[in-house]
């Protein structure tokens, strides 16, 4: 059975500040989470991988480079870029804080958080959520098709697009937001995708339990 390991990138400055960070923004990865990267690499080292892919955004690429460099295996795949894995674009709301948006645009922000398309969001340049689902799922299907049916594949991506894409691939609409450096595993059999693991963080020694809404 093929398995696809999808990892959300590490924490950035904007993640900690709770600022919307989509396709139009790329704040730096924090440098004070080295232990968490080591913990994730130790978990991933239980398996070998035939291929590794990343969103083109810097925070995902850097996360992939850090983890691949820490894998203790004879053969580590080169990191390839897949544009379809890019995060949702938040348009004019990129960089705005959650508290600011709740205070000034409460109802519209609620729709953004729930991933509900709205003409007012479209007018702000927020990417259509149905389109995000479809492009992410198409990228994963194409990656899966290139590999053997028993291959393990690493993906480094983002919280919003990954959540939507996994819903599209599996038909599971009950999936919540993803934490930084979480791993979600899709099992692939006969072209069908199933959730094996979702938002796994048990390997991390510290998880922020008060993080709140991680879906933005």
Image (cartoon, rainbow, N blue to C red):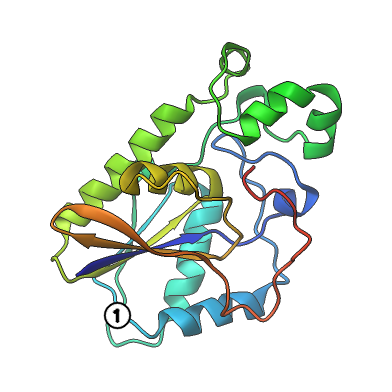
User: Which percent across, then down, holds residue 7?
Assistant: 47, 62
User: Which percent across, then down, holds residue 53?
Assistant: 35, 57
Q: Nearer the viewer, residue 74 or 134?
A: 134
Local crowd size for mark 1, using a 10 Å CA cut-off: few (<14), some (14–19), many (≥20): some
Q: Residue at x 49, y 79 (%)?
A: 41
Image quadrant containing the N terminus: bottom left
Q: Residue at x 56, y 50 (%)?
A: 176
Q: Quadrant of residue 119?
A: top right
Q: Quadrant of residue 204?
A: bottom right
Question: Taking 146 as reference, is 209 above or below it?
Answer: below
Q: Is residue 47 left or right of residue 189?
A: right
Q: Residue at x 45, y 77 (%)?
A: 69
Q: Is residue 204 left or right of residue 53?
A: right
Question: Taking 51 as reference, is 190 above or below it?
Answer: above
Q: Is residue 172 left or right of residue 107?
A: left
Q: Residue at x 71, y 28 (%)?
A: 109
Q: Nearer the viewer, residue 43 or 26?
A: 43
Mark 1, residue position = 48
Numbered label tally: 1
User: Which percent across, then down, holds residue 132?
Assistant: 43, 33
Q: Is residue 182 left or right of residue 133?
A: right
Q: At numbered mark 1, what does the secondary structure look like: helix, strand or loop?
A: loop
Image quadrant containing the C terminus: top right
Q: Quadrant of residue 78?
A: bottom left
Question: Taking 91 as reference, is 17 above or below it?
Answer: below
User: Which percent across, then down, holds residue 141?
Assistant: 24, 48
Question: Taking 177 as reference, is 69 above or below it?
Answer: below
């Amino acid at each position: 059975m093929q398995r696809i390991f999808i990892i959300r990138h590490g924490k950035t400055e904007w993640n900690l500040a709770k600022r919307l960070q989509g396709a139009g923004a790329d704040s730096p990865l924090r440098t004070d989470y080295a232990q968490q990267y080591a913990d994730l690499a130790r978990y991933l080292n239980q398996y070998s991988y035939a291929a590794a892919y990343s969103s083109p955004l810097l925070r995902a690429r850097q996360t992939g480079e850090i983890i691949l460099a820490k894998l203790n295996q004879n053969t580590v795949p080169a990191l390839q870029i897949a544009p379809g894995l890019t995060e949702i674009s938040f348009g004019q709301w990129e960089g705005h804080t959650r508290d600011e948006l709740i205070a000034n645009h409460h109802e519209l922000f609620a729709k953004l958080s729930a991933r509900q398309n709205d003409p007012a969001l479209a007018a702000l340049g927020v990417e259509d959520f149905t389109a995000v689902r479809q492009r992410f799922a198409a990228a994963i299907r194409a990656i899966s098709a290139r590999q053997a049916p028993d291959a393990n594949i690493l993906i480094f991506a983002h919280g919003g697009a990954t959540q939507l894409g996994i819903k599209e691939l599996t038909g599971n609409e009950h999936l919540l937001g993803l934490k930084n450096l979480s791993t979600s595993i899709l099992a692939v059999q006969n072209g069908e995708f199933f959730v094996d693991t979702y938002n796994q963080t048990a390997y991390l020694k510290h998880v922020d339990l008060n993080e709140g809404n991680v879906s933005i």
